[in-house]
């Protein structure tokens, strides 16, 4: 299975485009779909999703976990040079299309739920295909 991830990241007035491709496995277990692959840093990555939520787990040291829940705040923990950062995501758009094998998520990364400004804004598109 080929996996393609495109992420448009806006921090202040600066915009970065990140594109990642990988070969991995696709599985369905219960109500969830799973995409499992190794990223460019040779870390195992598991994407677990359904029509309402997505969890991205990167098995790095320390482990990185981002959760996205349609219309809600969710927990995020990301390793950084100053240690493990505990942040939140706020997902404003979440659209899963199993037929076209695509998931689109628009979210903000915030220091805490009451924050008045985001650390960054993201538009992510995930596709998988043979």
Image (spheres, rainbow, N blue to C red):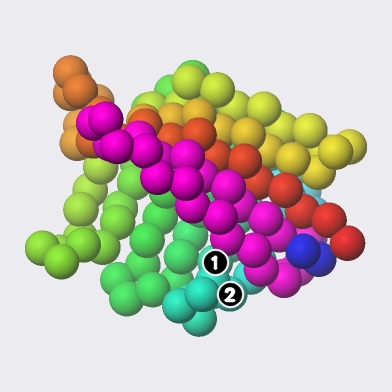
Residue 130 place in picture, x, y as percent: 88, 62
Please name the predominant secondary structure of the magenta segment in the image. Answer: strand
Q: In this view, does 77 lie to the left or right of 55?
A: left
Q: Residue 73 carries which label?
A: none
Q: Name the residue under label 1.
A: 45
Quadrant in which residue 26 is drawn: bottom right
**Depicted 88 relative to depicted 127: above or below:** above
Q: Name the residue under label 2.
A: 38
Quadrant in which residue 90 is drawn: top left
Magenta stretch containing residue 7, yes or no?
yes
Identity of the residue drawn at 71% across and 59% down:
3
Query: Which residue lies most toward the bottom here?
Result: 42
Q: Residues within 10 Å of mark 2 (few under 14, many from 20)?
A: some
Residue 9 place in picture, x, y as percent: 40, 40
Name the N-terminal-most of marks 1 and 2.
2
User: From this viewpoint, is residue 3 visible?
Assistant: yes
Q: Give the range drawn in magenta.
A: 3-27
**Depicted 10 relative to depicted 101: above or below:** above
Residue 54 place in picture, x, y as percent: 57, 42
Quadrant in which residue 97 is drawn: top right
């Amino acid at each position: 299975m080929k996996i393609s991830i495109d992420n448009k990241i806006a921090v202040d007035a600066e915009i970065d485009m990140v594109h990642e491709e990988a070969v991995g496995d696709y599985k369905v277990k219960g109500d969830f779909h799973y995409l499992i692959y190794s990223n460019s840093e040779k870390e195992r990555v598991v994407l677990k999703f359904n029509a309402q939520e997505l969890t991205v787990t990167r098995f790095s040291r320390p482990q990185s976990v981002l959760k996205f829940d349609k219309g809600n705040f969710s927990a995020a923990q990301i390793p950084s040079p100053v240690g493990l950062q505990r942040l939140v995501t706020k997902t404003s758009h979440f659209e899963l299309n199993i037929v076209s094998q695509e998931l689109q998520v628009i979210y903000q990364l915030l220091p805490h739920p009451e924050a008045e400004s985001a650390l960054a804004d993201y538009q992510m598109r995930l596709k998988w295909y043979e």
